[in-house]
Image: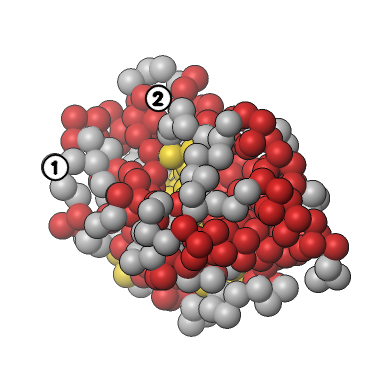
Amino acid sequence: MSASRRRLRIAMFAVALSLAVSAHGTSDLAADDLAREGRVAALAYRLASRAADAGLCAKPRPVTGMVLHDIAAYEPADRARVRSALKLGTGFGVRLVVPGSPAAVAGIRAGDEVTIVDDRPMADFALDRIGDEASPARTERFASMLELSLSKGSVRLTTQRPSPAVMLLLEHTLMGRPGCGGEVVVTSSRDVNGWSDGKRVAVTSALVDTAPDDAVLAFVVAHEMAHNILSHAARTGGASVAASLGLDGGRSRRAEIEADTLGIRILKAAGYDPMGGERFVAWAAREGHSRFSFTHPSTGKRVDALRAAVSTGD
């Protein structure tokens, strides 16, 4: 497994681990992490769905606007506390729901737990993935199963919802909306960075916290989505383009320009200020965040390419 792939798998449950902090009784950090992830989830859903509407990827996948977790994402020592604090069993918990998304329309809320998909109980789903250390593998398996089901049409979900008096059992009809670019996750790091592996996009908490505005952050996500859409990782042996430092600088620089250009098209489709790309490049250069100078074009060349992309009609 490549280093970038391992980092993305870690990112899958970075916020879930912060929820374990809440179970220990200190909720501020967990609340900050959830707010950060909620911002990115809303931004990513908007980019992915609008890009698909605009026909910017050949193979859109169903997106729902909900962020999931399960008990396997927590360290074994924390699982009893998490079960108690979050009322999370062996189903799949809903951490976040993007407003206006298919999950929201279906009536699913943060804090719900998916217990049945169509007629299949989740209590015994992939229990072998609940191991001796925290892992996103079980949620990944569930997400793949749900995506396959949604690609065929609507899915019936049964959820449990905690209430003061009783645990409510609710039924929902969930539809997927076509989306481009892959799942987007937030990983906790002091480094300002973003990367992709062909299927997913990761952005660091430091990038989310320090990006000058939403259009700048959206450009980074759209740029990494573009790498996935354009299958750039496949050209570098499965690693992210950024992680291919030293393999082929010229090829990587061309890939960056391609991703910048498609990223601007995604930004436009989603209704974000397309100048967010140029502002990002200027900000990154000013703040010293251009970490991959060998694989990335010069600031001047990127700005020229971004301006050209902004000036086109699509």
Residue highlighted by disc 2 = 22
In this rendering, the label closer to the viewer, 2 or 1: 1
Q: State whether residue 261 is above or below residue 275.
A: below
Residue 86 is left or right of residue 124, and the answer is: right
> Residue 178 location, x and y as percent?
60, 72
Position of residue 181 measured from the top left corner of the image (x, y, whole percent): 55, 64
Foreground residue among 132 and 104: 132
Q: Is residue 287 above or below residue 65?
A: above
- What residue appears at the point 43 percent right and 75 percent down from the top-left corner? 149
Name which residue lies at 70% across and 73% down.
53
Image quadrant holding the N terminus, namely bottom left
- Going by the numbered disc 1, the residue's amino acid type is Asp
Query: Is any part of residue 227 visible from this angle?
Result: no
Q: 10 Å neighbourhood of mark 2: few (<14), some, or many (≥20)?
A: some
- Disc 2 or 1, which lies upstream in sequence? 2
Label 1 sits on residue = 132
Which one is nearer the viewer's eye here, 125 or 18? Answer: 18
Residue in view at x 28 percent, y 55 percent? 2
Q: Is residue 111 above or below residue 137?
A: above
State the scheme by which the image is colored.
secondary structure
Q: Estimate the x, y position of residue 199 in percent, counting from the top left.
A: 44, 64
Among the 4 quarters of the image, the one containing residue 282 = top right
The quadrant holding residue 286 is top right
**Where the C terminus falls, by quadrant?**
bottom right
Instruction: Determine whether, in the image, residue 97 is placed left or right of residue 272.
Output: left
Q: Can you name the residue that lies furthest to the top here?
A: 26
Closest to the observer, 239 or 225: 239
The amino acid on which the numbered mark 2 sits, given as a three-letter code, is Ser
Q: Is residue 307 visible to the viewer in this orientation of the structure? A: yes
SS at mark 2 in the image: helix
Question: Pointers 2 and 1 in contact (CB under 8 A)?
Answer: no
